Amino acid sequence: MTDLDPALRRYLVDLLAAARDVLGDDLVGAYAAGSVGLGAYQPGRSDVDVALVCADALDPARKRELVARLRHESLPCPARGLELVVYRRAVACSGTPEPGFEVELNTGARMAFRATWAAAERAAEDGLFWYGLDRSILHQCGYALLGPPAADTFADLSATDLRRLLTDALRWWLALPTPPGDGPAPGAEDAVLGACRSLVKVRHGVWLSKADAGRRLIADGRPIGAVAGRSLAADAGRTPGAVAGGSLGGVAGSAAAASTGGDGGDADLIERSIAAREGGPPPGGPEARAFQRRVLAEISG
Protein backbone atom coordinates (compact mmCIF):
# COMPACT_ATOMS: atom_id res chain seq x y z
CA MET A 1 0.00 0.00 0.00
CA THR A 2 3.02 2.27 -0.35
CA ASP A 3 1.49 4.20 -3.25
CA LEU A 4 -1.52 5.37 -1.22
CA ASP A 5 -2.06 8.68 0.54
CA PRO A 6 -0.30 8.23 3.93
CA ALA A 7 -3.36 9.02 6.06
CA LEU A 8 -5.49 6.70 3.94
CA ARG A 9 -2.88 3.95 4.17
CA ARG A 10 -2.81 4.12 7.97
CA TYR A 11 -6.60 4.09 8.09
CA LEU A 12 -6.88 1.01 5.88
CA VAL A 13 -4.29 -0.83 7.99
CA ASP A 14 -6.26 -0.03 11.14
CA LEU A 15 -9.58 -0.93 9.50
CA LEU A 16 -8.22 -4.29 8.39
CA ALA A 17 -6.88 -5.02 11.88
CA ALA A 18 -10.24 -4.21 13.47
CA ALA A 19 -12.09 -6.36 10.93
CA ARG A 20 -9.74 -9.27 11.64
CA ASP A 21 -10.36 -8.89 15.37
CA VAL A 22 -14.10 -9.26 14.81
CA LEU A 23 -14.24 -11.79 11.97
CA GLY A 24 -11.13 -13.85 12.59
CA ASP A 25 -10.61 -16.63 10.06
CA ASP A 26 -13.99 -15.87 8.46
CA LEU A 27 -12.40 -12.79 6.87
CA VAL A 28 -11.02 -14.10 3.58
CA GLY A 29 -10.66 -10.87 1.61
CA ALA A 30 -10.58 -7.08 1.93
CA TYR A 31 -10.56 -4.72 -1.04
CA ALA A 32 -10.53 -0.98 -1.62
CA ALA A 33 -12.93 0.01 -4.37
CA GLY A 34 -14.25 3.26 -5.81
CA SER A 35 -11.77 6.09 -6.25
CA VAL A 36 -8.99 4.15 -4.49
CA GLY A 37 -9.30 1.20 -6.85
CA LEU A 38 -9.57 3.49 -9.87
CA GLY A 39 -6.50 5.50 -8.85
CA ALA A 40 -8.46 8.73 -8.40
CA TYR A 41 -8.58 9.22 -4.63
CA GLN A 42 -8.69 12.91 -3.65
CA PRO A 43 -7.99 13.63 0.04
CA GLY A 44 -10.79 15.72 1.47
CA ARG A 45 -13.20 14.98 -1.37
CA SER A 46 -13.35 11.24 -1.98
CA ASP A 47 -15.07 8.56 0.05
CA VAL A 48 -13.26 5.41 1.13
CA ASP A 49 -15.05 2.41 -0.37
CA VAL A 50 -14.16 -0.96 1.15
CA ALA A 51 -15.55 -4.43 0.47
CA LEU A 52 -14.92 -7.21 2.97
CA VAL A 53 -15.42 -10.84 1.99
CA CYS A 54 -16.32 -13.46 4.59
CA ALA A 55 -16.39 -17.23 4.23
CA ASP A 56 -19.90 -17.68 5.62
CA ALA A 57 -22.96 -15.70 6.67
CA LEU A 58 -22.50 -13.41 9.68
CA ASP A 59 -24.74 -13.66 12.72
CA PRO A 60 -26.39 -10.46 14.03
CA ALA A 61 -24.00 -10.11 16.98
CA ARG A 62 -20.91 -10.08 14.75
CA LYS A 63 -22.52 -7.59 12.40
CA ARG A 64 -23.22 -5.26 15.32
CA GLU A 65 -19.69 -5.67 16.66
CA LEU A 66 -18.15 -4.97 13.25
CA VAL A 67 -20.21 -1.80 12.83
CA ALA A 68 -19.32 -0.67 16.36
CA ARG A 69 -15.60 -1.14 15.70
CA LEU A 70 -15.54 0.50 12.27
CA ARG A 71 -17.90 3.43 12.65
CA HIS A 72 -16.29 6.87 12.56
CA GLU A 73 -16.63 7.44 16.31
CA SER A 74 -14.46 4.36 16.95
CA LEU A 75 -12.13 4.54 13.96
CA PRO A 76 -12.01 8.07 12.51
CA CYS A 77 -12.06 8.11 8.73
CA PRO A 78 -9.66 10.66 7.15
CA ALA A 79 -11.91 11.10 4.10
CA ARG A 80 -15.46 12.34 3.68
CA GLY A 81 -16.58 9.00 4.99
CA LEU A 82 -16.38 5.22 4.80
CA GLU A 83 -18.73 3.17 2.65
CA LEU A 84 -18.24 -0.44 3.75
CA VAL A 85 -20.03 -3.51 2.40
CA VAL A 86 -19.52 -7.10 3.55
CA TYR A 87 -20.24 -9.97 1.16
CA ARG A 88 -20.15 -13.73 1.51
CA ARG A 89 -17.56 -15.29 -0.77
CA ALA A 90 -20.31 -17.17 -2.65
CA VAL A 91 -22.08 -13.89 -3.47
CA ALA A 92 -18.88 -12.13 -4.54
CA CYS A 93 -18.03 -14.81 -7.08
CA SER A 94 -21.59 -15.30 -8.37
CA GLY A 95 -21.90 -12.34 -10.74
CA THR A 96 -25.39 -11.62 -9.40
CA PRO A 97 -26.89 -8.18 -10.03
CA GLU A 98 -28.69 -8.32 -6.67
CA PRO A 99 -27.39 -6.43 -3.58
CA GLY A 100 -26.56 -9.66 -1.75
CA PHE A 101 -24.64 -8.11 1.14
CA GLU A 102 -24.35 -9.23 4.76
CA VAL A 103 -24.08 -5.78 6.31
CA GLU A 104 -23.49 -2.26 5.02
CA LEU A 105 -22.06 0.74 6.86
CA ASN A 106 -21.88 4.41 5.88
CA THR A 107 -20.06 6.56 8.42
CA GLY A 108 -17.87 9.65 8.52
CA ALA A 109 -17.42 13.23 9.65
CA ARG A 110 -19.27 14.46 6.54
CA MET A 111 -21.46 11.43 5.90
CA ALA A 112 -24.72 10.49 7.57
CA PHE A 113 -24.45 7.32 9.64
CA ARG A 114 -26.29 4.37 8.20
CA ALA A 115 -26.14 0.66 8.98
CA THR A 116 -28.16 -1.83 6.94
CA TRP A 117 -28.16 -5.25 8.55
CA ALA A 118 -29.23 -7.36 5.56
CA ALA A 119 -29.69 -6.92 1.82
CA ALA A 120 -33.43 -7.50 2.19
CA GLU A 121 -33.63 -4.35 4.36
CA ARG A 122 -32.30 -2.09 1.62
CA ALA A 123 -35.15 0.12 0.41
CA ALA A 124 -35.73 0.09 -3.34
CA GLU A 125 -36.07 3.88 -3.41
CA ASP A 126 -32.48 4.16 -2.15
CA GLY A 127 -31.21 2.24 -5.17
CA LEU A 128 -30.54 -1.49 -5.50
CA PHE A 129 -28.16 -1.07 -8.44
CA TRP A 130 -25.12 0.13 -6.46
CA TYR A 131 -23.85 -3.26 -5.35
CA GLY A 132 -23.69 -5.10 -8.65
CA LEU A 133 -21.97 -2.09 -10.23
CA ASP A 134 -19.52 -1.82 -7.33
CA ARG A 135 -18.63 -5.51 -7.66
CA SER A 136 -18.08 -5.01 -11.40
CA ILE A 137 -15.62 -2.21 -10.61
CA LEU A 138 -13.98 -4.43 -7.99
CA HIS A 139 -13.60 -7.20 -10.57
CA GLN A 140 -11.68 -4.85 -12.85
CA CYS A 141 -9.59 -2.81 -10.45
CA GLY A 142 -10.22 -3.65 -6.80
CA TYR A 143 -7.20 -2.89 -4.60
CA ALA A 144 -6.47 -6.04 -2.57
CA LEU A 145 -5.72 -5.38 1.10
CA LEU A 146 -6.14 -9.04 2.03
CA GLY A 147 -6.80 -12.19 0.03
CA PRO A 148 -6.50 -13.15 -3.64
CA PRO A 149 -6.64 -10.61 -6.47
CA ALA A 150 -9.99 -8.90 -6.78
CA ALA A 151 -10.55 -10.32 -10.27
CA ASP A 152 -10.42 -13.82 -8.75
CA THR A 153 -12.81 -12.92 -5.92
CA PHE A 154 -15.48 -10.83 -7.66
CA ALA A 155 -17.23 -12.03 -10.80
CA ASP A 156 -18.28 -9.43 -13.34
CA LEU A 157 -21.86 -8.78 -14.42
CA SER A 158 -23.29 -10.09 -17.65
CA ALA A 159 -23.64 -7.49 -20.40
CA THR A 160 -27.43 -7.57 -20.01
CA ASP A 161 -27.32 -7.06 -16.24
CA LEU A 162 -24.71 -4.33 -16.55
CA ARG A 163 -26.78 -2.31 -19.00
CA ARG A 164 -29.91 -2.75 -16.85
CA LEU A 165 -28.16 -1.58 -13.67
CA LEU A 166 -26.61 1.41 -15.43
CA THR A 167 -30.04 2.33 -16.77
CA ASP A 168 -31.55 1.97 -13.30
CA ALA A 169 -28.80 4.17 -11.86
CA LEU A 170 -29.33 6.97 -14.36
CA ARG A 171 -33.10 6.90 -13.86
CA TRP A 172 -32.57 7.04 -10.09
CA TRP A 173 -30.33 10.10 -10.41
CA LEU A 174 -32.79 11.79 -12.76
CA ALA A 175 -35.59 11.29 -10.23
CA LEU A 176 -33.75 13.30 -7.56
CA PRO A 177 -34.92 16.90 -7.00
CA THR A 178 -33.10 19.58 -8.97
CA PRO A 179 -32.17 22.95 -7.40
CA PRO A 180 -34.22 25.80 -8.90
CA GLY A 181 -32.72 28.05 -11.56
CA ASP A 182 -29.99 27.62 -14.13
CA GLY A 183 -27.05 28.69 -11.96
CA PRO A 184 -24.22 26.50 -10.70
CA ALA A 185 -25.58 23.52 -8.76
CA PRO A 186 -23.23 21.78 -6.30
CA GLY A 187 -23.04 18.11 -7.17
CA ALA A 188 -24.02 18.60 -10.81
CA GLU A 189 -20.42 17.90 -11.82
CA ASP A 190 -20.65 14.43 -10.30
CA ALA A 191 -23.95 13.83 -12.08
CA VAL A 192 -22.29 14.65 -15.41
CA LEU A 193 -19.10 12.71 -14.79
CA GLY A 194 -20.92 9.73 -13.30
CA ALA A 195 -22.93 9.54 -16.52
CA CYS A 196 -19.67 9.76 -18.47
CA ARG A 197 -18.29 6.78 -16.55
CA SER A 198 -21.40 4.72 -17.32
CA LEU A 199 -21.23 5.56 -21.01
CA VAL A 200 -17.52 4.75 -21.26
CA LYS A 201 -18.21 1.36 -19.69
CA VAL A 202 -20.88 0.64 -22.31
CA ARG A 203 -18.88 1.97 -25.26
CA HIS A 204 -15.44 0.67 -24.34
CA GLY A 205 -15.99 -2.08 -21.76
CA VAL A 206 -13.75 -0.45 -19.14
CA TRP A 207 -14.33 1.35 -15.85
CA LEU A 208 -12.49 4.65 -15.49
CA SER A 209 -12.51 7.32 -12.82
CA LYS A 210 -15.15 9.98 -13.36
CA ALA A 211 -12.70 12.59 -14.63
CA ASP A 212 -10.86 10.13 -16.90
CA ALA A 213 -14.19 8.94 -18.29
CA GLY A 214 -15.08 12.53 -19.17
CA ARG A 215 -11.75 12.97 -20.93
CA ARG A 216 -12.28 9.71 -22.79
CA LEU A 217 -15.62 10.91 -24.18
CA ILE A 218 -14.09 14.21 -25.27
CA ALA A 219 -11.36 12.28 -27.06
CA ASP A 220 -13.98 10.02 -28.67
CA GLY A 221 -15.58 13.01 -30.37
CA ARG A 222 -18.72 10.94 -30.97
CA PRO A 223 -22.26 12.25 -30.46
CA ILE A 224 -23.81 11.27 -27.14
CA GLY A 225 -27.23 9.69 -27.31
CA ALA A 226 -26.94 8.88 -31.01
CA VAL A 227 -25.29 5.46 -30.81
CA ALA A 228 -28.17 3.65 -29.11
CA GLY A 229 -27.96 -0.12 -28.93
CA ARG A 230 -24.19 -0.24 -29.35
CA SER A 231 -22.76 -3.52 -28.10
CA LEU A 232 -20.37 -3.69 -25.16
CA ALA A 233 -18.05 -5.51 -27.54
CA ALA A 234 -18.14 -2.79 -30.20
CA ASP A 235 -14.72 -1.53 -29.16
CA ALA A 236 -13.27 -4.93 -28.32
CA GLY A 237 -10.40 -4.24 -30.69
CA ARG A 238 -9.28 -1.25 -28.62
CA THR A 239 -7.10 -1.52 -25.56
CA PRO A 240 -9.02 -0.42 -22.41
CA GLY A 241 -7.61 2.85 -21.15
CA ALA A 242 -5.66 3.46 -24.36
CA VAL A 243 -6.64 7.13 -24.24
CA ALA A 244 -5.59 7.54 -20.63
CA GLY A 245 -2.56 9.32 -19.23
CA GLY A 246 -0.22 11.20 -21.53
CA SER A 247 -2.05 10.31 -24.72
CA LEU A 248 -4.90 12.58 -23.73
CA GLY A 249 -2.53 15.51 -23.60
CA GLY A 250 -2.02 15.16 -27.33
CA VAL A 251 -5.68 15.44 -28.28
CA ALA A 252 -5.95 18.22 -30.84
CA GLY A 253 -7.60 21.41 -29.74
CA SER A 254 -10.36 20.87 -32.28
CA ALA A 255 -11.25 17.52 -30.68
CA ALA A 256 -11.22 18.94 -27.18
CA ALA A 257 -13.42 21.82 -28.21
CA ALA A 258 -15.76 19.92 -30.51
CA SER A 259 -19.33 19.50 -29.42
CA THR A 260 -20.37 15.89 -28.78
CA GLY A 261 -24.02 16.86 -28.85
CA GLY A 262 -26.29 19.17 -26.91
CA ASP A 263 -26.89 22.91 -27.01
CA GLY A 264 -23.50 24.51 -26.08
CA GLY A 265 -21.42 21.40 -26.49
CA ASP A 266 -21.07 18.41 -24.26
CA ALA A 267 -17.28 18.69 -24.40
CA ASP A 268 -17.50 22.10 -22.72
CA LEU A 269 -19.90 20.74 -20.09
CA ILE A 270 -17.59 17.82 -19.34
CA GLU A 271 -14.55 20.09 -19.09
CA ARG A 272 -16.37 22.40 -16.66
CA SER A 273 -17.43 19.40 -14.60
CA ILE A 274 -13.84 18.17 -14.37
CA ALA A 275 -12.70 21.66 -13.37
CA ALA A 276 -15.39 21.80 -10.67
CA ARG A 277 -13.76 18.82 -8.95
CA GLU A 278 -10.67 21.00 -8.56
CA GLY A 279 -12.57 23.95 -7.11
CA GLY A 280 -14.17 25.56 -10.15
CA PRO A 281 -17.89 26.40 -10.36
CA PRO A 282 -20.16 23.41 -11.03
CA PRO A 283 -22.44 23.32 -14.06
CA GLY A 284 -26.13 24.10 -13.79
CA GLY A 285 -28.67 21.50 -12.80
CA PRO A 286 -30.77 21.64 -15.99
CA GLU A 287 -27.79 21.16 -18.32
CA ALA A 288 -26.53 18.27 -16.18
CA ARG A 289 -29.97 16.64 -16.34
CA ALA A 290 -30.15 17.09 -20.11
CA PHE A 291 -26.76 15.41 -20.45
CA GLN A 292 -27.84 12.51 -18.24
CA ARG A 293 -30.93 12.03 -20.40
CA ARG A 294 -28.82 11.80 -23.56
CA VAL A 295 -26.56 9.23 -21.92
CA LEU A 296 -29.60 7.29 -20.73
CA ALA A 297 -31.03 7.30 -24.26
CA GLU A 298 -27.83 5.74 -25.60
CA ILE A 299 -27.40 3.17 -22.84
CA SER A 300 -31.03 2.07 -22.75
CA GLY A 301 -31.52 2.12 -26.51
Image (cartoon, rainbow, N blue to C red):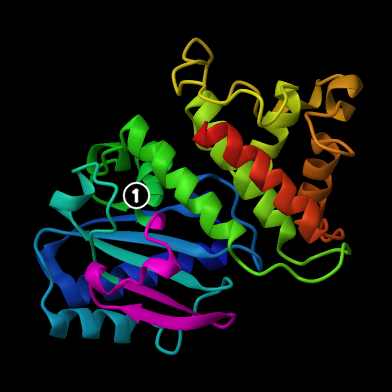
Residue drawn at x 77%, y 42% is 270
Residue 186 appears in the figure: yes
Q: Is residue 289 left or right of residue 172?
A: right
Is 117 placed above or below 200 here?
A: below
Front one among 80 and 185 = 185
Q: Residue 51 in the image: state x and y as whole percent.
A: 33, 59
Residue drawn at x 65%, y 45% is 293
Q: Which residue is mark 1?
A: 132
Q: Residues within 10 Å of mark 1 (few under 14, many from 20)?
A: many
Is 173 placed above or below 225 here?
A: below
Q: Residue 183 in the image: state x and y as whole percent.
A: 89, 64
Front one among 28 and 180 = 180
- The answer to whether residue 208 is magenta is no
Q: Residue 100 in the image: state x and y as whole percent.
A: 23, 59
**Magenta region:** 104-130
Of the residues shown, which amino acid type is indicated by label 1? Gly
